[in-house]
Amino acid sequence: MIVLAMRPNQRVSSIPLSQTLALDARAKAMIAEGRDIINLSVGEPDFDSPAVVREAAKSLIDSGGVRYTPAGGTPSLRTAIAEHLTRSRGTAFSPAQITVCHSAKHALSGALLTLTEPGDEVLLLLPAWVSYFEMVRFAAGTPVAVAPRADLGPDFDTLRRAITPRTRGIMLNSPCNPSGYVFTPGEITALCDLARESDLWILSDEIYSRLVYDGAPYASPVEVSDDARERTVLVDGASKAFAMTGYRMGYLAASEEGASAVARLHSQLAGSPNAVGQHAFEAALADEPPEVAAMAHEFALRRTRLVADLCALGLQTPTPGGAFYVFSDVRPWTDERGSDGFCEDLLEAEGVAAVPGSAFGVEGRVRFSYAASAEALRAAVERLGRFLARRGRAQHFQDSAPT
Ligand code: PMP
Ligand code: GLU
């Protein structure tokens, strides 16, 4: 029997399942069926959470006192986050400017639901993480995609041309998922100048800020000027920095008014964040676990190796400055189904799961996560080589190198 009243409403019906999570679920289901799958789809550190995190989680559980906390997070975690940001971003934050959320995703959606009026245009710098598009739409805004330069960095001419009287904000993600591109300090300053000129807010997703390689500087809009700081909502979390994806811990830092507005919203929609996760996150921030630097070091090694291997196969792959993804140009090997078809065939034929560039608003590329063991990456490259050799380059790309 179909009960029509139970149909999801229009706003929810139009939301697709997150493509990264859907692909991960599909790869895992194939593994459960006994298929030999190398899963390079989801972006999730393949390391255990640091010892101090596990100890803290267990100690709170063992105390018996796992209870509701304030909707915006425990005072002690907000203090730890404010101190961490003050140290790492070079500008002072107070606990009243911090709202702890159920994840960085929850912080981003909370910020967008708080900032966006119906019809507001929000600029998304391509390639943009898959969930940004749907989060902006769900907040009744209009995502406006801005194409990148050839090296996947921001194209300020295109960005300027995308600004209209309806533009209200810009989402920034450095290091970027999926490209790993790290904005230079000059680019961050230019972005802040543009935001000031057009009176835009900046939603700065800094979830990969601890995973920046080669000693490159990490720049955040909050350190550019007082003006930039006031128009920025900074989002970060525990998932990537501390290999704590399952704890679901994120936060935002904003003005006191902004932070408390999101906490008010979340007090009605979601209630207090997970108490165990908060306790464990606080321990991670207090102790700077040694596992974190070791993890970042290992990611950097894998990145260098993987980029070299992919380039050797003929897949043009810029060296990412951060995060744990590479974003390869597969256009010479695509048919009319583009990157979707490439990933579908790669999964079926060789059992390698990767995410099509179309999910991030850029056709002709594929994201491979290197949050996987060195052996898995080596095997994936071997399979990919076989796949490309069998597939052959498309006729129109025979004579020209990919750009
Ligand atoms: N932002 C970006 C760019 C991401 O890749 C992710 C994926 N985890 C998130 C935010 C969300 O992180 P989480 O919800 O695990 O805190
Ligand atoms: N952010 C990760 C990714 O892009 C995790 C999946 C998700 O949260 O969508 O793969």
Image: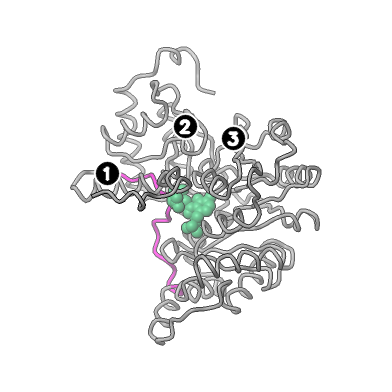
Write the residue at 68% across / 72% down: 96
Numbered disc 3: secondary structure? loop
**Whole-number angstrom distance, CA of label 1 to CA of label 3:** 29 Å
Disc 1: which residue: 37
Q: Residue at left 71%, top 50%?
A: 201
Q: Position of residue 12 (x, y in %)?
A: 45, 48
Q: Residue at x 59, y 55 (%)?
A: 113
Q: Mark 2 to mark 3: distance in Å?
A: 11 Å
Q: Evaluate if marks 2 and 3 touch, with contact meaning CB atoms under 8 Å apart.
A: no
Magenta stretch encompasses residue 45? yes
The magenta stretch spans which residues?
A: 38-53
Q: Height in image: 335 above or below 5?
A: above
Q: Is residue 5 left or right of residue 164?
A: left
Q: Secondary structure at mark 2?
A: strand
Sequence-first disc among 2 and 3: 3
Front one among 113 and 246: 113
Q: Nearer the viewer, residue 118 or 113?
A: 118
Mark number, residue 152: 3
Which mark is first along the chain, 3 or 1?
1
Amino acid type for the residue under numbered disc 1: Ile
